[in-house]
Image (cartoon, rainbow, N blue to C red):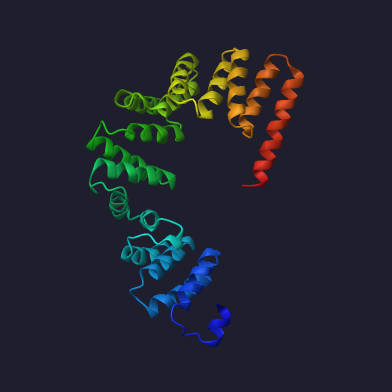
Amino acid sequence: MQTLEARDPTTKGLALELGTAFYKKNDLPKAIEYLKKATAEEPGNGEASQLLGLSYYLGGHPAEAIPLLEKVQSWYPRANVDAAYILGISYIQTKDYEHARRSFGKMFDVPPDSAASYLFTARMLLRQEYDPVAEEYAQKAAALDPKLPLVHFLLGELYIYKSRVPEAITEFQKELAINPGHAETYYKLADAYSRVQKFEDAQRLLQRSIWLDATSTGPYILMGKVLEKKGEYELAVRALQKAASMDPNNPTTHHLLGQAYRDMGKKEEAESELKLAEELRTRQDSHP
């Protein structure tokens, strides 16, 4: 295409093709250069506008991305990303939270002023580490609809992250009152109880989480940790071995197994697991 450009730089559609190629190579300055040409040549070309907006966003310029993405609400496959989501994140990064909420509401087909819209935006804000605004939006969602599933769960997650454990426990309890079949809430509440050393309560809740969903390793790992704290080493090892069989490459599981074996006086098994945990952690650190 660059050879063709050298021969005839005015070839119709060439700037878009070159811009797309550089976008896919993650050469964003070049992508922006050619996609600006493409949009100048054909202002109504939605794909060119969208790719240019995405290039600006990925290049760390959300303010420049917003007007382009606002013009294009559909999704073009060659972008390999949902532009509506990127538009909402761009609003967050420019601190335009109201438009972010409207964008996410539209993305999930809910009214922009609904509790669900506030909940979705709070989740995105938390993911982007805008914690104070995430808390404000989650509280607004809970005020609009106190029985909305997962809103108290999100508040509980936020409070756990901020080490506000009593508040987290209260929110997870509220979630279970309206959403008693949610396995992850039992797990997260158990985590909160374990942090205040209420190990019996944590164990009871973890068993419920596992009964509801036996495919997640998190409850088994935390169960092993709780049982080890209670001095029930054989049961701790059993729970951790189950977690290791589900995900053999998790260094935390093997480290906890090593600790449990050490507490049992099984020196060789402890050394083997602790060595494996260190190897897995080193491997992960070298491949972020």
Q: Residue furthest bottom?
A: 7
Residue 231: x and y in percent read: 60, 12
Which quarter of the rendered picture does the N terminus lie within? bottom right
Of the pair 242 and 262, the residue shown nearer to us: 242
Q: In which quarter of the image is residue 48?
A: bottom left
**Residue at 30% of width from left, 50% of height from top?**
101
**Residue at 43% of width from left, 48% of height from top?**
128
Residue 29: x and y in percent read: 52, 70
Q: In which quarter of the image is residue 227?
A: top right
Residue 258: x and y in percent read: 68, 23
Q: In this view, does 187 lie to the left or right of 2?
A: left
Q: Is residue 140 left or right of residue 259?
A: left
Residue 58: x and y in percent read: 48, 61
Q: Is residue 121 left or right of residue 223?
A: left
**Residue at 61% of width from left, 33% of height from top?**
250
Q: Is residue 201 above or below residue 106?
A: above
Q: In this view, does 6 lie above or below 244?
A: below
